[in-house]
Amino acid sequence: LQIVALERQVFDFLGYQWAPILANFFHIIIVILGLFGTIQYRPRYIVVYTVWTALWVTWNVFIICFYLDVGGLTKESDLLTFNISAHHSWWSERGPGCVRREMTQPGVGTVDSQSYISVMGCLMEYQYIEVLHSATQILIALLGFVYACYVISAITEEEDSFDFVAGFDPFPLYHVNEKPSHLLLKPMYLST
C-alpha cells in the first residue's frame, strides 16, 4: 500500500506534477495515521482514513479523466503543475520502449535554451500508464476502505463488550447487584 504511493510520488516528483505531489503527500500521511489507528485501537484515526479513502478515489477518478481527456479536461493543460512550469508526466518522454531525441534550435547555444523533444516507439502511451497508476490506486484504496470498515467494526464491537470490572469475559464469575441510581443517592438513617 505504502510502497505503491511512494512509487507514484517519485514519478510525480520527476515530472514536476505539483498537484499530484501534494495529494500523494497527504495520502502517505493519512495512510500512516490509519495504520497507527489500527495498531493502537483508535477508531477515530481509522475513520479519518476511510473518509480520506473516498477523497482519494475521487482524486484518482479525476486523474483518469484528465489523462483520457474526458469532460473538457485535457492532458496538455498545465493544471497538474499549477501553471508553474511546462512539465508534463515523466512517462511522456521515458515510457517503456520510448526513444527520446532532443533537437536543439539552430543558432541558439545557451544552457537554458529550449529544445524540441521527439518521442517515438513507445510500447504504451504515457497517458495509459498514468491511468493504470490511478486505477491501481483506486483498487488498493477500495480494499483499504473495506478493511478499515472491518477494523472499525471489530474495535467498536470489542469496546461494547468490554466489562470494566471483569474484562472481556462475557460470563463473569460474580454478579454485581446493580441498584437504580435514585436508590444510591438516598441518605441512610440510623435508628437508635
Image: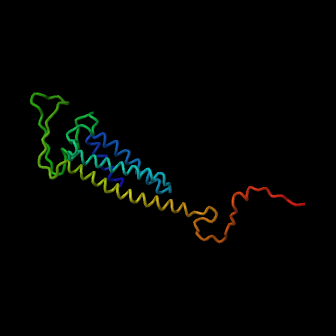
Task: Determine whether, in the image, residue 191 is placed left or right of residue 137.
Answer: right
Tally of numbered tags: 0
Determine which quarter of the picture holds residue 18: top left
Residue ranking furthest to the right: 192
Residue at position x 31%, y 40% in the image: 19
Residue at position x 21%, y 41% in the image: 74
Task: Determine whether, in the image, residue 12 is placed left or right of residue 40.
Answer: left
Q: Position of residue 56 (x, y in %)?
A: 34, 49
Residue at position x 39%, y 59% in the image: 146
Q: Position of residue 174 (x, y in %)?
A: 67, 70
Residue at position x 9%, y 30% in the image: 106
Task: Give the position of the N terminus as an image quadrant.
Answer: bottom left
Task: Give the position of the C terminus as an image quadrant.
Answer: bottom right
Q: Position of residue 16 (x, y in %)?
A: 27, 39
Residue ranking furthest to the left: 106
**Up/down of 94 relative to 150, above or below:** above
Closer-to-camera residue (4/137): 137
Residue ranking furthest to the front: 182
The image's colour scheme reads rainbow
Closer-to-camera residue (103/72): 72
Determine which quarter of the picture holds residue 136: bottom left
Closer-to-camera residue (164/4): 164
Closer-to-camera residue (54/10): 54
**Up/down of 96 relative to 173, above or below:** above
Q: Position of residue 191 (x, y in %)?
A: 87, 60
Task: Determine whether, in the image, residue 188 is placed left or right of residue 77.
Answer: right
